[in-house]
Amino acid sequence: MQAIGIDIGGTKIAGALVDDDGRVLRSERRPTPAADPDAIVAHAVEIVRSLAGEGGIPPVGVVVPGFLDAQRERVYYAPNISFRDVPLRALLAEGLPGASIVIDNDANAAGWAEFRFGVGRGVSDMVLLTIGTGVGGAIVADGRLLRGGFGVAGEIGHASLVPDGLACGCGQHGCIEQYGSGRALLRFAGEIADAGGVGLQLAAARRADGALDATNVGRLIAEGDPGALAALGQLGGWLGRACASLGAVLDPRVFAFGGGVAAAGELLLEPIREAFHAHVPARGFHPEPDFRIAELVNDAGVVGAADLARARFAVG
Ligand SMILES: [Zn+2]
């Protein structure tokens, strides 16, 4: 059974026709008219129609970067795409009469895709951390996405890590996102550049480019620069510490890492493992989860969205 997945991001709307092995058969994307919720819905509807072609419309999953209600009818809040309490499922159904439609959070969809077709295949319990500008998350427990009583579980980036730590955009202090995100990596890199010593190359890149960013820090990491690796080590240290707490609650077999920073691969996983072992409760007696890099980097959102729809509406 085929299904269509639509991933509405802050800059682009991606759509794909996906088969039941998670393969993308056809895809389409357009820029997001981020300030205009009605136009976003209209674009999503058009992409669905175009991907469906002449036949009927297969099940449709639409995911957004925001909070949804537990019934998955409305988007309460999606800061980057100006959705404020939008009845998204009903609006899509208006544009696609008779179609079977589910809506969900984009991080949940990415986690589901990794669980079904990527790095989490074959396990029942997995936690995905997406290390981009911020820190996103998804939790699969006992083979199901954990959505929580209000529909907003898995906001791992805003679990507290450092008491009275750095202020976070969510209004709290010391959230995982402030220590485990791409933005945190750049902050660590800047501090190391300021300190001199191993920060020499980082300081030189900052002078040459005007600022440290994902590109120059990523390049220095790939080149094995000791300062950039030290920054990545700090990031991994915080993430490993966070995973030790998450593991105590959720007991996943796999911790998966996606997002831009995950391109560092083993260089990121090593300090995460080390810190996990240092902070895990019942150290030495605790079964060891696997720490892995996510596999479905670009397609996770659309593949997960389609599969959530397929799973919801599959018959027999
Ligand atoms: Zn926060």
Image: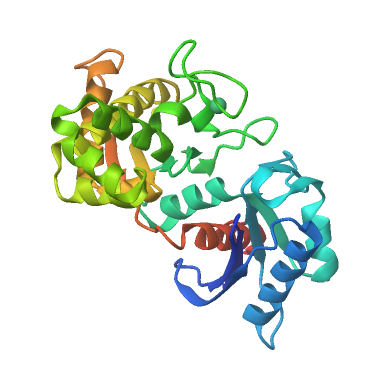
> Residue 114, can we see it?
yes
5, above or below 162, in the image: below
Quarter residue 212 falls in = top left
- Residue drawn at x 39%, y 58% is 296
Location of the C terminus (image quadrant): bottom right
Q: Is residue 281 left or right of residue 60?
A: left
> Residue at 33% of width from left, 52% of height from top?
215
Query: Residue at the spot x=72%, y=75% of the render?
Result: 46
Q: How many marks?
A: 0
Q: Quadrant of ligand 1?
A: top right
Work out whether residue 122 can be spotted.
no
Residue 69, percent across and down?
74, 40
Q: Quadrant of residue 95?
A: bottom right
> Image check: 70 left or right of 174?
right
- Give the image location of residue 66, x and y in percent: 65, 44
* Residue 240 vertical placement versus 76 (above, below): above
Residue drawn 42% across the image and 52% down it: 114
* Rendering coords of residue 284 (x, y %): 19, 17
| In the image: residue 135, left or right of residue 218 | right
**Near-viewer residue (224 or 29):** 224
187 vs 4, nearest the viewer: 187
**Which is more toward the observer, 238 or 23?**
238
**Horizontal and vertical percent for residue 195?**
23, 24
